[in-house]
Image: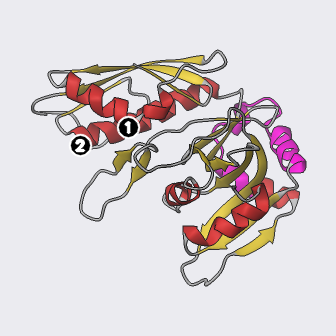
Amino acid sequence: MRIVGLGASLEVHPDGPRADELTDALTVAWSRCLHQPAEPARDAGSLTLRLVEQQHAAPDRLTDRDATEFESDDLATLLSAGTQLITRALLAAQIGRLLLFHAGAVSHPETGATLVFVAEGGTGKTTLARTLGRHYGYLTDESVGIDEHLRVLPYPKPLSLRSPTIWPKLETSPDALSLLTPPAESRVAKVVLLARDHTLTSPIVTELALLDAIAALGPQTSSLYRLPQGLHRCADLLDATGGALEVRYAEASDLLPLAADLIGAPQ
């Protein structure tokens, strides 16, 4: 099967004695990334995922960031590792071409105006994407790619949902969560940097000066140094969208009014 995201395309080969079971699970989880892209996609290579009857020496967790094969006797473990490997391959194909952020993104379902929310892993991007995605078009919950025209190249991957009783995270299709689909083209309208603070009763929004915003965004980019004039591209993005905001918040639902202010209320 071919998985498309971030303007790149990866050939994924389900393998092993339980390949049919794996194929069915991947087809459901990656339902929104199996379409043919409207524009030619960059080749991200191939990946083999192998679902075996009994695992002997393979690791319980993914340790090789550049692996092109991974096997497990546990379907959930294989799907979780597969999401990591697929994301890394698609990102690698666009290094030096796109502004790449560790971020989620949703867009207005009619105008395509896009809110990009940047944050470290484990700080609420997936929960926010799930919450906002019921009202706005779901673009991604993890990795945002932006071209020189401020277009966001969609990556509607499965959402990796935490379970209080089960490891690993559950790879869940945006279709299963009833998230909206974005319009054909989405462009960045605003960039926000997220910070969780469970003591707050309402979000605190702070405008960031340009240099402060770039300094804060830098650690949440992928290979910015390999993007020609990467800092200039980042500065141009912020200038075109009126600068970045720092948003401290407690719960994802608290940010629905802010999203409406920044990219328009959905109809």
Q: Is residue 92 above or below residue 42?
A: below
Whether residue 62 is visible to the viewer of this picture, yes or no, is no
Please tell me which residue is depicted at 41% across the width and 37% down the height of the picture. Answer: 83
Q: Quadrant of residue 43?
A: top right
Q: Nearer the viewer, residue 80 or 174?
A: 174
Q: Earlier in the sequence, mark 2 or mark 1?
A: 1
Inspect the image, locate mark 1, and give the three-letter code of the amino acid beneath it: Ala
Residues in magenta? 216-240
Q: Which residue is mark 1?
A: 29
Q: Nearer the viewer, residue 147 or 25?
A: 25
Q: Nearer the viewer, residue 45 or 33?
A: 33
181 displayed left or right of 46: right
The percent coordinates of residue 196 (x first, y second) are 58, 71
Which class describes the residues within 10 Å of circle 2: few (<14), some (14-19), or many (20+)?
A: some
Q: Is residue 59 above or below residue 15?
A: below
156 is within the stretch colored magenta:
no
The percent coordinates of residue 216 (x first, y second) are 72, 58
Q: Kindly report the distance in space between the C-alpha atoms of the residues bearing marks 2 and 1.
A: 21 Å
124 displayed left or right of 58: right
Q: Quadrant of the N terminus?
A: top left
Please tell me which residue is depicted at 72% across the width and 34% down the height of the picture. Answer: 185
Inspect the image, locate mark 2, and give the three-letter code of the amino acid beneath it: Asp
Whether residue 185 is visible to the viewer of this picture, yes or no, is yes
Q: Quadrant of the C terminus?
A: bottom right
Q: Which residue is mark 2?
A: 60
Which class describes the residues within 10 Å of circle 1: few (<14), some (14-19), or many (20+)?
A: many
Are the two marked residues, 2 and 1, in contact with CB atoms closer than 8 angstroms?
A: no
Q: Is residue 191 above or below residue 155?
A: below
Please tell me which residue is depicted at 10% across the width and 30% down the height of the picture. Answer: 53
Count the labels in the image: 2
233 displayed left or right of 42: right
The percent coordinates of residue 114 (x first, y second) are 72, 47
